[in-house]
Image (cartoon, rainbow, N blue to C red):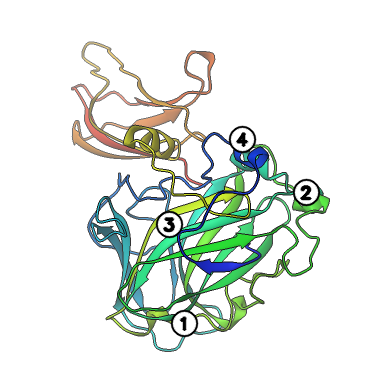
Amino acid sequence: MAYIGKSLSTGAGGYIGTGLDRAIRARPNFVINGDMQCWQRATAATAANNSYATVDRWAFGESTDGAYTSEQSTDTPTGTGFSVKAQVTTADTSIAAAQFAYIYQEIEAQNLQPLQYGTSSAKTLTLSFWVKSNKTGTYTIVIVKRDSTAYFIPVEYTISSANTWENKTITITPTAGSTSLITASAGAIANDNGHGIQLGFGLAWGSNYHGTSNTWSASTHYGTSNQVNWMDSTSNNFYLSQVQLEIGDLATAFEHEDFATTLAKCQRYFKKSSGLADDDAWTNIINVIELGYMRTTPTITTTVSTGANAVFTAFTGLGGAPVHGVYQSTANNALAQAYIDAAAEL
């Protein structure tokens, strides 16, 4: 759920704010994998499960009487690369008060320190993205300042033309709605590896989550009463790509990173390893699999392909540094191989 603010326009955007704001971050996009390059978990249609299912760093919230999937698509605004496609598979024509469906990304707190939230110098943000759907009408984005005291800001935008890529730009001020929540001390975001803000794209919001567009609130306002019910037909799809969240009051052109850089950022939160050979108890050999600087000690899920009794355990502090890894923690009397998923998501 989210926070947002000021003006809304449709178009390519322009130059970002001041030169000083631009200089704050050599890489201005707070969103990781905004152009949907990395898909470690799956690329085929996978049911939304209120967690991470397909594209890296993006989660799919769903609590309705219907269902939808996410998948990789080559339908993009530029004709190259990928977008994420959401598709309704079971319709819900009447969203109950506590029900919702949305796509979101959690952004790590320490990456957001340039925002200076919790001070009178709090920065304005600009969100830009490309979106496409067969269902036109009013949608909402939301930013939730999750750290310590939670604050929410939904902002409306319109999909005007069916089945057409549209570029949207939304500017978010720290005092949107004539509020002082973000500039007061409770608006601060801790300089740590916990939750900072959540950026969400609403698909359907029940009345429990309705608030005023472009206004910060301490209530759980993730959307507005004008949000379409995208879940109302199995014909409905929703495509998203080139999501950028940056400091300043204007949008810059989308920041395209090389694949290796984006993948390395994604692997701080989730890393998939395969074909690993570990402990052979016959020769008392233990091979440590280093996972690198993940956000926190990961949760390890293994699919053992050789050595059915093998158990793999996560650890931290490799070589005295906060490097994470896995090792085979039980003897197997044979070479063990496994496919390992290491998750350290927010």
Residue 86 appears in the picture as rendered: yes
Q: Secondary structure at mark 4?
A: helix
Instruction: Please name the amino acid that badge 2 sits on.
Output: Gly
Q: Which mark, residue 118?
A: 2
Identified at 75% across, 61% down, the residue is 175
Q: Which mark, residue 228?
A: 1
Return the disc, 4 or 3, that comes first in the chain's sequence.
Answer: 4
Instruction: Please name the amino acid that badge 4 sits on.
Output: Ala
Q: Secondary structure at mark 2?
A: loop
Q: Position of residue 257 (x, y in %)?
A: 39, 38
Q: Nearer the viewer, mark 3 or mark 2?
A: 2
Return the disc, 1 or 2, that comes first in the chain's sequence.
Answer: 2
**How would you rate the neighbour count of disc 2 (Cα within 10 Å): few for under 14, some for 14-19, many for 20 or more?**
some
Q: Nearer the viewer, mark 3 or mark 1?
A: 1
Return the disc, 3 or 1, that comes first in the chain's sequence.
Answer: 3
Tag 3 residue? 59
Disc 4 from disc 3: Cα separation? 30 Å
Looking at the image, residue 29 sits to the left or right of residue 115; the answer is left
Instruction: Please name whichever residue, 104 or 176, is drawn nearer the observer in this view of the structure.
Output: 176
Identified at 28% across, 81% down, the residue is 234
